[in-house]
Each structure stands twice: as C-alpha cells, then as structure tokens.
Amino acid sequence: MRLEPPSVRARSALLPPALFALIAALVAGGWGPLHTLDRTVTARLHEAAHAGPALTTAMTWLTNLFQPNVFRLAALILVIWLLRKGARRTAAWVATTMIAGGLLGALLKLVFLRDRPDFPDPVSSAAGYAFPSGHALNAVLGVAVFVMIFPRLWALWVIPPVTALTRVHLGVHWTSDVVAGLLLGVAVVLASRWAFFRYGHEKSPVHPATHAEHRTVQRPPGRMRPSPATAPPRAHRPPEPAPED
C-alpha cells in the first residue's frame, strides 16, 4: 500500500477548513456571483418541489430521518457501547466531536445571521438562521464517528450529501449553506481526531477489539512440569550383556 508523506496529509487536512473559510468570507462579504448561484439553484429546486409532490414527500421523509437529533442519539449509544468495551479514549473522541461540532455550528449561525430562503408558497419551513446548515454538519459528524470506528460501514457516506440535497430541495437552505456545513463537519472531525490520536500508538479511532489490553495469563498454583530444556538428564544404564548360548 502506498503511503502519502506527512506533508501531503497535512495539506489535505487543511483543505476542508480553508474551503469553509473561503465560503464564509464570500457569504459575509455579499459576493454577487455566489448569491446569484444560491438564488438560481434554490429557485429551480423550488419549482421542482412544486412540480413533483411525490419527490418532495420523499425529501421530507429523508430530511426528518437524518435530522441532527438522530445522529446525536446514535452517537450517545455508540459512546455507551465503547465505554462498556473499555475504549474510553475513543468514546471521549466521539462525544467531543459531536458536542463541539454542534456547538460550533450553532455559534456560527449567530455570527453570520443569514436568513433562510423566503418563498410566497413554501413547501417546508425551518426555524433559526441558515449558515451553516446544521443538518449537513451533523450528518457528517454522525457518519464520520461510525465509519472511522467501523470502516466496513463506508456506504454511510452517502447520507451527508443526500441530507444536504433535501435541505435545498425543500427551500430551507441556500446551496452555500449546505456545502459549508459539509466542509465544517469534515474539518471538525479531522481536528478532533488529530487532538485525540496524535500521540501514542493509536493514530485514529479504532474498534475496541483491535486495541484490547494484553493480559498475562497466569498458571494456577501447583506443581509445574519442568520444560525439556531445564529437566535434569536421565541416567543411562549400560546395556546388560546377552546370555551366552
């Protein structure tokens, strides 16, 4: 397997927060092309939502299924399971990632104070501010903590972009809101993983069974059989002479 040098991995880890910062700056500065793109995509998807009620119903079900509280509950169950297995560091990482990411997203909403799309005939509604999308952010956080512990669940990565699409289709977020939420989620996961697993033998969160403590197996008290290497040599008796005929 080909390994990337540390400098390449470091640059890759800095890409998500850098892209998030760029989008945040463009949103805060009112950059015209970005706002035009947001309005165009949202308007087209709003028309599609009214033209296809069945698709809109499916999007509503999906956005409710993948709401932040679902991922928080799943993460809580995972933390309890990890603690029962003795994986305290990994459990602390999961809890910290979910809590820190959620609080950061809520704080940024109050910083940017961006209004949600407003339609005279909305197909859905949501409270609070728009930037960044909490649904997209928590979808990344929730999926990441599971996939990094159980790599075979990699197919769960389809959930965050689907969740982001539902938010724009239902007209409760701009496109830049959900893209920023996805990027922020990746940035939080990378930062928390680095903070928890940069030292020691564990370089990433792992399944408890892969880093169980090795315990010395003790023999029950009693007489122990000496090993062949330490056993005293047996005395060899000379062969008896054969009787003469």
Image (spheres, grey):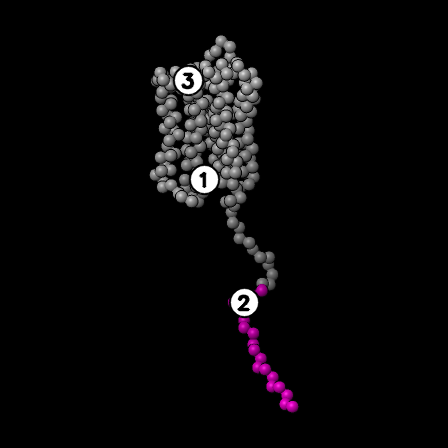
Q: What residue is disc 3 on?
A: 38
Q: Is residue 30 above or below residue 141?
A: above
Which mark lies nearer to you, 2 or 1? 1
The image quadrant where one finds the N terminus is top left
Q: What residue is disc 1 on?
A: 204
Mark 3: which secondary structure?
helix
Mark 1: which secondary structure?
loop
Q: Give the Cα distance between marks 3 and 1.
A: 37 Å
Instruction: Give the percent coordinates (x, y) of residue 2.
Output: 40, 43
Q: Is residue 17 left or right of residue 59?
A: left
Kind of residue sitting beneath label 1 = Ser
Question: What stretch of residues is rendered in magenta?
Answer: 225-245
Q: Nearer the viewer, residue 4 or 138?
A: 4
The residue at 34%/39% (across/down) is 7
Instruction: Give the percent coordinates (x, y) of residue 3.
Output: 39, 43
Kind of residue sitting beneath label 3 = Asp
Q: Is residue 239 magenta?
A: yes
Q: Give the Cα distance between marks 2 and 3.
A: 80 Å
Q: What residue is disc 2 on?
A: 228
Q: Nearer the viewer, residue 227 or 46?
A: 46
